[in-house]
């Protein structure tokens, strides 16, 4: 019997088919990723390391706090 695969982020065992489709990333780590990172990993699960190494914007589709406040 072979050992279960490990999540590349937290090194915990992963057994689900969904984790295998996500490049081995477990459910807890998957929920921590930004939507843009998830989409990139879904597109090409073999490149998950490149996706995780790329810097992530502070917020997806949101304005910075200064621009949200009304100007006086």
Image (cartoon, rainbow, N blue to C red):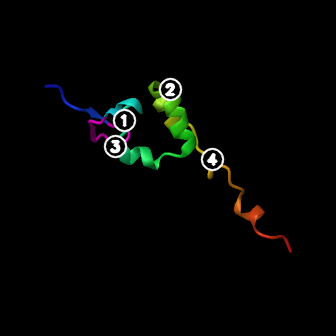
Q: Secondary structure at mark 2?
A: loop
What is the distance, in whole Å, between disc 3 and disc 2 at their CAs? 20 Å
User: Residue at label 1?
Assistant: 18
Chain part drawn in magenta: 7-16
What is the distance, in whole Å, between disc 1 and disc 2 at their CAs? 14 Å
What is the distance, in whole Å, between disc 4 and disc 3 at their CAs? 22 Å
What numbered label is drawn on residue 44? 2
Q: Which residue lies most toward the left here?
A: 1
User: Residue at label 4?
Assistant: 57
Residue shown at 67% from the left, 50% from the top: 61
Residue 31: x %, y % from top left: 44, 48
Residue shown at 30% from the left, 36% from the top: 16
Residue shown at 86% from the left, 74% from the top: 72
What is the distance, in whole Å, between disc 3 and disc 1 at their CAs? 17 Å
Q: Secondary structure at mark 3?
A: loop
Residue 53 seen from this side: no
Instruction: Give yes or no for contact between labels 3 and 2 (Cβ–Cβ under 8 Å).
Output: no
- Label 3 vs 2, first from the N-terminus: 3
Instruction: Give yes or no for contact between labels 3 and 1 (Cβ–Cβ under 8 Å).
Output: no
Residue 43: x %, y % from top left: 53, 28
User: Residue at label 3?
Assistant: 10
For marks 4 and 2, give the one nearer the viewer: 2
- Label 4 vs 3, first from the N-terminus: 3
Residue 67 seen from this side: yes
Q: Is residue 3 left or right of residue 69?
A: left
Residue 42: x %, y % from top left: 49, 32
- The quadrant of the rendering that contains the N terminus is top left
Residue toward you, 55 or 22: 22
- Label 1 vs 2, first from the N-terminus: 1
């Amino acid at each position: 019997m072979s050992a279960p695969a490990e999540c590349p982020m937290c090194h915990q065992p992963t057994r689900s088919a969904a984790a295998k489709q996500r490049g081995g990333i477990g459910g807890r780590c998957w929920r921590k990723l930004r939507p843009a990172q998830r989409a990139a990993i879904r597109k090409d699960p073999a490149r998950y390391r490149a996706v995780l190494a790329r810097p992530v914007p502070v917020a997806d589709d949101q304005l910075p706090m200064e621009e949200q406040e009304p100007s006086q």
